[in-house]
Image (tube, rainbow, N blue to C red):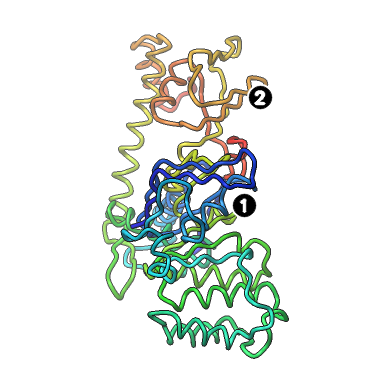
Amino acid sequence: MFRVHQLTYIPSDKGSFRLEIPEFTWDGRGVLALVGSNGSGKSTLMSLIAGLKKPTTGTCTFAGYNTFFSYDKVKFNLPLISWDIPLSPQLKPKSYLKLVRDLASKWNHELENRLLDEFSIPTDQNIGSLSRGEQAKVKILLASCSSPEILLIDELTSDLDTDSRKKIFNFLDEQVFSETFGIIWASNVMTDVEKYATHIAVLNKGKLVASETLDDFKVRHQKIALHSISPERKIDLSFLRGEKLSWDGQNGLLSTKEFSKDLEKKLLAEGVTLSLLPYSLAEIINEYGV
Amino acid sequence: MQIKIDPHAPLPIYAQIMTEITSHIAHKFLSCGETLPSVRQLAVQLEINSLTVQKAYKMLENEGIIVIRKGVGATVSDHALTKIKENLGSDIFKELGGVLQKAKNLGVPRKEILAFLDTLWEGKEP
């Protein structure tokens, strides 16, 4: 449904930064969290997917359409919601609604009425006088009513008031669950990603270093406490050299990016007992130096 | 129904939900035919993605522990307890197999293990 193919993007102004993604596909069902530090290329990738930036080489396609060259065809299917793309502060939500309603090929009037009520958006005030939470709701409303297939959300939800956040998350979850649309969500708030994402893609210095379901990702990454069965025997993990793990012998803590039944067997065969410890997504992502 | 999850735990959230529901049934806090909260309700309550709850429900359905009907939702199946016992049984043998493998690797002789099992079985202190 959505594909990135042999994509590179080299901006003219960013020094040595380059974005490079050989291949990435997603069926558009669920919530794909795009994580990575500032400067990892998240926002650049979001703009490329939305068709707002021209790839240096390669393509982003949605349903077979090149998102940059066929931007007019896909813009309502793949709307990008970002603080970097501000609404005009002098306009009222009412005027924005009329504008987008007239431009969009499909418009969901029922949803518009529902959300105006549910989000209690003041339609008659200038956008500039609205709170951040209200502005976020206006953006979600505009994008959701024009029948999107994948909503691209760039950091929109990070600093909203609790009530706005709850209402927005609740609405988005309902839409994703009923398969109305999917979401690609760039975020640095790992506690949110951990609970609301179904898929994760990790960007580091312009490269994808992981992409899979969040469940698989979490099972693969484990922090393990090791104890030797006989106290006089020191745990020696040198036989595991080269595998993706870090070993803190002082505290008997092993962190691995590749936990498997096979690794478990190897460790047990060394005469250790192991217990899996809590390991937050923030800690895991930290290990990537992201 | 009180369901607790910890997003940082080593077990994925869907698996934690499965464990919680299974344990509620095993402890008779939930009985056969009883209705579970809807997928959306539970997701809102736990503040997680609905698809995660759905995954847990689908897998519990595959294990024969709950039944999902259109319009009715998820209910505890008539054979839930039997199914849970069956699954636990196979888990116990799996664990025992692991322990045995460990003992073998460490060179503990078969005789010693059997003698040890007998002592434990009779409830004596090893």
**Residue sitting at the far front:** A12
**Residue B116 point in image, percent of width and height:** 41, 18
Residue name at image x 48 percent, y 67 percent: A79
- Closer to the camera, B37 or A244? A244
**Where the C terminus of chain A falls, by quadrant?**
top right
Residue drawn at (68%, 63%), measured in percent from left and top?
Answer: A159
Q: Is disc 2 placed on a helix, strand or loop?
A: loop
Q: Is residue B97 above or below residue A197?
A: above
Using the rendered image of the protein, determine whether residue B37 is visible from the camera's viewpoint. no
Residue situated in front as seen by the camera: A75 or A201: A75
Percent across and percent down for residue A157 are: 61, 64
Q: Position of residue A75 (x, y in %)?
A: 44, 68
User: Residue at the right extreme?
Assistant: A129
Q: Circle 2 sits on which residue?
A: A251
Q: Residue visible at 59% across and 23% down?
A: A247
Count residues near mark 2 (Cα–Cα under 10 Å), then give few for <14, some for 14-19, many for 20+.
Answer: few
| Residue identifier under label 1 | A188
Query: Is residue A206 something one can see in this rendering?
Result: yes
Disc number lying in front (2 or 1): 1
Q: Name the amino acid, label 2.
A: Asn
Q: Nearer the viewer, residue A52 or A223?
A: A52
Q: Chain of mark 1?
A: A
Secondary-structure class at tag 1: loop
The crowding category of the residue bearing disc 1, from other C-alpha atoms within 10 Å (few below 14, some 14 to 19, many at least 20), is: some
